[in-house]
């Protein structure tokens, strides 16, 4: 439930920021200049600080009201997301402390994997079943004397993306993973193949922690 609320807040926030930027492009010259070059991280604060005043022309007044409203909405969504993040962290750390202790696993990533496991308890009967659930079980794609496997496009796509985030983090920050990638590339493996293999390894680590949750 918390992930749904957070996802909704994130999508609405993006929409509001895009609307603020659009109004800044098409609004009166005064507002266009005020919003020109404002960084995205400061856009909501700048819009929320606008104060519509009586006596200005109707277009400027209406645009300021719209910008102020959208800016306040983004700031309120940021506060809501912060509260959701706090609740998520409490639940995830209480449910699966070993999962968040894994290298590259953050609170959001752990929460997504916990939800995938909770929605499909029958898929936790074995490590292979969990790998299929996450779409990381290898699919045979050999031809002739060439033996290879390809990426699995099925399974729970959110869980699959969570594993990808873990792998991506490790590829940039974990020395052992970087050496593994370099060795596999030297052997002629493609980057997608290497990521598939790493996601399967990560799924094995995650599965062990989920069984303890």
Image (cartoon, helix red, strand yellow):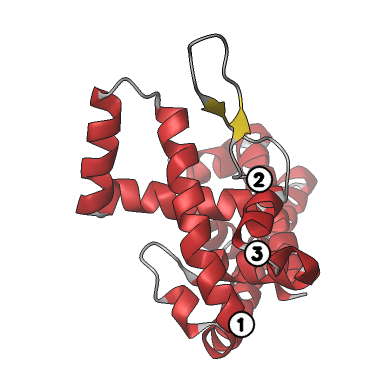
Left or right: 87 with respect to 175? right
Compared to 26, does 147 lie above or below?
Answer: above
Pointer 3 and pointer 1: residues touching (CB < 8 Å)?
A: no
Q: Secondary structure at mark 2?
A: loop
Residue drawn at x 61%, y 28% is 140
Q: CA distance from mark 3 to mark 1?
A: 35 Å
Q: Residue at x 55, y 9 (%)?
A: 144
Q: Residues within 10 Å of mark 1 (few under 14, many from 20)?
A: few
* In the displayed structure image, the side of residue 135 where residue 196 appears, left or right: left
Give the position of the N terminus as an image quadrant.
bottom right
Secondary structure at numbered mark 3:
loop
* Residue 64 coordinates in the image, percent (x, y): 68, 54
Residue 24 on image: x %, y %: 61, 40
Q: Which one is in front, 90 or 151?
A: 151
**Disc number placed over residue 126 in the picture, else none:** 3
Point out residue 25 in the picture as x, y percentages from the top left corner: 61, 34
Density class for disc 3 (Cα within 10 Å; few <14, some 14-19, many ≥20) is few
89 up-or-down from 134: above or below: below
Residue 135 is marked as 2
Task: Decide which of tag 1 and tag 2 comes sooner along the chain.
Answer: 1
Seen at 63% across and 55% down, the residue is 128
Residue drawn at 59 percent across, 45 percent down: 136
Q: Residue furthest top?
A: 144
Q: Is residue 183 visible?
A: yes
Query: How busy is the neighbourhood of tag 2: few (under 14 within 10 Å), some, or many (20 plus)?
Result: many
Q: Is residue 15 above or below residue 140?
A: below
Image quadrant in which the C terminus is located: bottom right
Point out the frontmost of discs 3 and 1. 3
Give the residue pinned by disc 1: 83
């Amino acid at each position: 439930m918390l992930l749904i609320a957070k996802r909704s807040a994130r999508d609405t926030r993006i929409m509001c920021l895009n609307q603020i930027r659009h109004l800044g492009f098409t609004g009166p010259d005064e507002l266009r200049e005020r919003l020109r070059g404002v960084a995205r991280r400061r856009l909501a604060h700048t819009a929320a600080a606008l104060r519509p005043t009586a006596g200005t022309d109707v277009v400027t007044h209406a645009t300021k009201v719209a910008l102020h409203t959208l800016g306040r909405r983004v700031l309120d969504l940021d506060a809501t997301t912060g509260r959701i993040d706090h609740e998520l962290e409490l639940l995830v750390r209480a449910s699966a402390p070993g999962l968040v202790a894994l290298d590259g696993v953050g609170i959001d990533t752990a929460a997504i994997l916990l939800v995938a496991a909770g929605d499909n308890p029958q898929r936790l009967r074995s490590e292979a079943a969990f790998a299929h659930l996450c779409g990381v079980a290898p699919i045979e794609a050999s031809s002739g004397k060439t033996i290879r496997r390809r990426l699995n496009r099925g399974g729970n796509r959110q869980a699959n993306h969570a594993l990808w985030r873990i792998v991506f983090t490790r590829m940039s920050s974990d020395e052992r993973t970087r050496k593994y990638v370099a060795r596999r590339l030297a052997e002629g493996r493609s980057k997608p193949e290497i990521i598939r293999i790493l996601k399967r390894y990560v799924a094995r680590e995650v599965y062990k922690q989920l069984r303890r949750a």
